[in-house]
Image: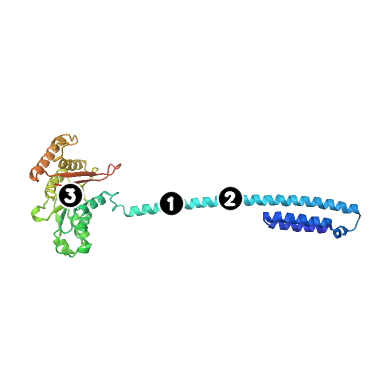
Amino acid sequence: MTIQVIAMLAVFCFISRQTTVRSCFVSKRTFVRRSRNVLHDPSCRAIGGGSNNHRLNDKRKLTGSIDLLLRRVLSRAGSTLTCKSTGNSTQAAAAASTNDKQAKVANYEEELQLQRHLSLHYNSNPTIATTALAHLLWKTILRPGIDSAIDATAGNGNDSLAIANILFPLHDITSTSTASKLYCIDIQQQACETTRQRLELQYPVQLEQDRIHIMKMSHAPLAITRQNSSSVALVVYNLGFLPQSNNKEQCITTPISTLESLIDASLLLRVGGLLSVTTYPRTNQLEHEMAYAFLECLALLTSNTQDWNEYIESLSQLDSGQKDSLRKAVEYVQQSGPPRQTWRVYQHAKVGWTDAPILLTATRIK
């Protein structure tokens, strides 16, 4: 009987290892019930023969073995439960960590995608690029088919092309009723050729001959007059030098020539027209100061807050000769222009970037 019981217990132990915690507890109850049946079964007591004392000792040994086995089973079940609980916690922590990493990766990829998007549209974003802001302002001024415009410093032709796109829309490129004209001026032959090539990529030669005029000359004095143009609504300056030029030191705008050109432009503009001047303080601080001061004097012509003569005298960064040139320029505009002409002037500059180009705009409202 002892051999059979031990075999039964061994089988039970093997089965209990393969089952879940719940099945372990169920097996315990089943095992206890069956074990008790074995101990009280007369047929089982007769197996092996022997006296009653021997059978009693066998019962006691068997009962002790069963108790020991049950304790081991319960201990194993508790260990299994602990391992499963620990395993579930570990898996949950690992899953949370994985989800957190995936979220960080997704955020990083989204940020990279946004940066790529911004980098692709950097130059065309008016909230970022000064040139894009200027182009946006020009669209609010120019009337296609009616107004004319002057790019007084054509350079690489970028501004000329932007103006052409406004005045001569591609969907109406064959129209012959337009009175608009575009004058592209630059003193360098290289700049004139670059501007021509850029325009030819988009517009037919016939349109360039009739409506777009590329002129090799200085921006001062302006060769355009009211007699040989329609309503001039925009005069554009991008001061400095041609970036790709091999002769930057000699072919560069100067404070005096720019001031002379601004005089002509202010007298040429229609009511509602715009002067657009991009200056580069890092390249030529004096030219920026002179252009800014002249435009501010235009704003002070009808101002009740300060006299423009007093303003010029307060400019400590200018010497007496420069102040005198500025004063003569403002007097000429005041005497030659319409009475009570009124201007609104603005400065658009990047904050925190001292070397950035500055956009100055002056709109004639009366």
Instruction: Indicate which disc, 1 or 2, sits on the residue closer to the N terminus.
Output: 2
Residue drawn at point x = 78 percent, y = 50 percent: 67
Number of marks:
3
Left or right of residue 269: residue 358? right
- Which SS class for mark 1? helix
Is the residue under label 3 in contact with that under label 1 (CB below 8 Å)?
Answer: no
Name the outermost residue toward the right.
51
Q: Earlier in the sequence, mark 3 or mark 2?
A: 2
Q: Nearer the viewer, residue 319 or 54?
A: 54
In the displayed orientation, state which residue is furthest to the bottom. Answer: 174
Residue position marked by numbered label 2 in the rendering = 90
Q: Amino acid at mark 3?
A: Leu
Tell me the quarter of the image containing the N terminus.
Answer: bottom right
The CA span between labels 1 and 3 is 44 Å
Q: Quadrant of residue 165?
A: bottom left
Q: Which mark is residue 198?
A: none
Tell me where residue 311 sits by quadrant.
Answer: top left
Q: Which residue is mark 3?
A: 274
Q: Is residue 147 above or below residue 287?
A: below
Where in the figure is residue 255, as x and y percent of width and height?
A: 16, 43
Q: Nearer the viewer, residue 177 or 268?
A: 177
Q: Residue at x 87, y 51 (%)?
A: 57
Q: Does the image show residue 184?
A: no
Mark 1 lies on residue: 107
Residue 104 on image: x %, y %: 46, 50
Q: Secondary structure at mark 2?
A: helix
- Nearer-N-terminus badge (1/3): 1
Q: Position of residue 296 (x, y in %)?
A: 17, 41
Kind of residue indicated by mark 1 = Asn
- Residue 77 pos. (x, y %): 69, 52
Mark 3 crowdedness (10 Å alpha carbons): few <14, some 14-19, many ≥20: many
